[in-house]
Image (spheres, rainbow, N blue to C red):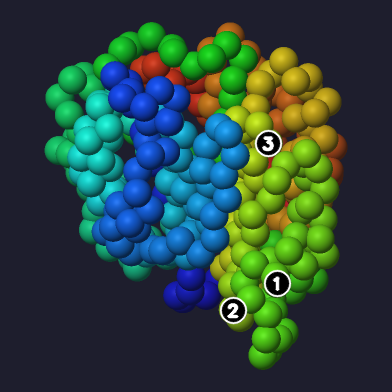
């Protein structure tokens, strides 16, 4: 393990809003790009590519991704970004379009280089204190939890605050957050660019998407991709009103890949399993952790376990918890059977 390197593990913030939308159906999507850039400046990242459809806008960032829906924002950043500093400016911008915060979710894994993180990300305790101090008081149902695993380097951190206590997830909906470390060295090399290749980041990104098999994970998705110089890769996928995203830090010693998507259990178990298998096969990681967030009545985690174990991995731990208005979170870790 390297003493210091780029932090691949992302911090993820999801904000839900409600209220009188003066422009029906547009909401947060009417925010000026300059306003979004100013928020990202607080976080210490920038937009490198963007695409949108009739449902939402997706931005590839210099450190991960941003998704803007009419009444929802998801921002995910890696490295030493200060993600939680986006909360105050985002609440002000939402207020300008007649929206107020109804729910906040913050999640992350365990940092590879925790001592390199700036305030307020120096510890989960500090993050929770910052969230408590910067969220409006009407989000009165709150819970923070560290979900452990048998692998001490892989824990899942969750904070949820809501103005309602009951589960308000659409029936059957789920979010999968997959974190992978110790990527196969040969496969990881595909995320390095040739020196002085003279290509733009989006052009090199499209080539990586095809060469690695990422383009086949969801062939229905519109992909916005970007390859960094000298290495690293990000993509956002848009499939109707659903997003997916992949981020890769391929350097040996602290290699990391992540995949996130949303879906519905009513799509069928086979579709979820097929997608997960494709993701893991792109990277062949030494460790996989998966956090599945879903309405309490559905067990997506069993599909996850079955799919990953069919690839020669063994589940080492499984932890579950319930959160106000956010349903249940099941966190599982896997390593190859030989270990």
Looking at the rendered image, the quarter that the N terminus falls into is bottom right
- Residue at position x 30%, y 62% in the image: 41
Say what secondary structure mark 3 lies in. strand
Say what secondary structure mark 2 lies in. loop
- Residue at position x 29%, y 19% in the image: 20
- Kindly check if marks 2 and 1 are in contact, taking CB atoms under 8 A apart as contact: yes
- Neighbours of disc 1 within 10 Å: few (<14), some (14-19), many (20+): many
- Answer above or below: position of 172 versus 194: above
Which numbered circle lies on residue 165?
none
Q: Is residue 222 left or right of residue 321?
A: right
Identify residue for label 2. 229
Nearest the camera: 102 or 283? 102
Q: Quadrant of residue 72?
A: top left
Tell me the CA gap for discs 2 and 3. Answer: 28 Å
Between circles 2 and 3, the one closer to the viewer is 3
- Residue at position x 75%, y 30% in the image: 272
Q: Quadrant of residue 198?
A: bottom right
Indicate which disc, 2 or 1, sits on the residue closer to the N terminus.
1
Identify residue for label 1. 204
Between circles 2 and 1, the one closer to the viewer is 1
Picture coordinates of residue 210, whole percent (x, y): 81, 60
Nearest the camera: 279 or 335? 279
Identify residue for label 3. 239
- Neighbours of disc 2 within 10 Å: few (<14), some (14-19), many (20+): some
């Amino acid at each position: 393990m390297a003493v210091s390197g780029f932090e691949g593990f992302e911090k993820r913030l999801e904000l839900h809003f409600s209220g009188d939308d003066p422009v029906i159906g547009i909401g947060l999507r009417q925010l000026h790009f300059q306003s979004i850039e100013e928020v990202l400046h607080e976080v210490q990242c920038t937009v490198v590519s963007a695409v949108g459809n009739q449902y939402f806008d997706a931005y590839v960032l210099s450190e991960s991704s941003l998704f803007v829906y009419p009444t929802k924002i998801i921002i995910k950043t890696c490295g030493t970004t200060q993600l939680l500093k986006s909360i105050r400016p985002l609440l002000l911008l939402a207020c300008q379009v007649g929206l107020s915060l109804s729910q906040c979710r913050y999640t992350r894994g365990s940092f590879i280089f925790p001592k390199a993180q700036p305030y307020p990300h120096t510890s989960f305790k500090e993050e929770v204190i910052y969230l408590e101090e910067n969220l409006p008081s009407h989000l009165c149902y709150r819970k923070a939890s560290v979900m452990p695993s048998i692998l001490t380097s892989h824990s899942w951190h969750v904070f949820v605050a809501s103005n309602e206590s009951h589960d308000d997830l659409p029936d059957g909906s789920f979010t999968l957050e997959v974190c992978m470390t110790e990527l196969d060295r040969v496969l990881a090399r595909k995320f390095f660019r040739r020196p002085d290749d003279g290509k733009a980041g989006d052009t090199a990104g499209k080539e990586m998407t095809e060469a690695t098999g990422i383009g086949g994970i969801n062939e229905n998705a519109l992909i916005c991709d970007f390859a960094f110089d000298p290495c690293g890769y990000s993509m956002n996928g848009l499939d109707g009103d659903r997003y997916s995203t992949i981020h890769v830090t391929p350097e040996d010693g602290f290699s990391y890949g992540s995949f996130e998507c949303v879906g519905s259990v009513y799509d069928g178990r086979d579709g979820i399993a097929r997608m997960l298998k494709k993701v893991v096969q792109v990277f062949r990681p030494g460790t996989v952790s998966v956090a599945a967030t879903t309405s309490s009545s559905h067990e997506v985690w069993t599909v996850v376990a079955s799919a990953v174990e069919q690839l020669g991995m063994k589940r080492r731990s499984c932890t579950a918890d319930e959160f106000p208005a956010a349903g249940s979170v099941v966190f599982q870790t896997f390593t190859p059977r030989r270990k």
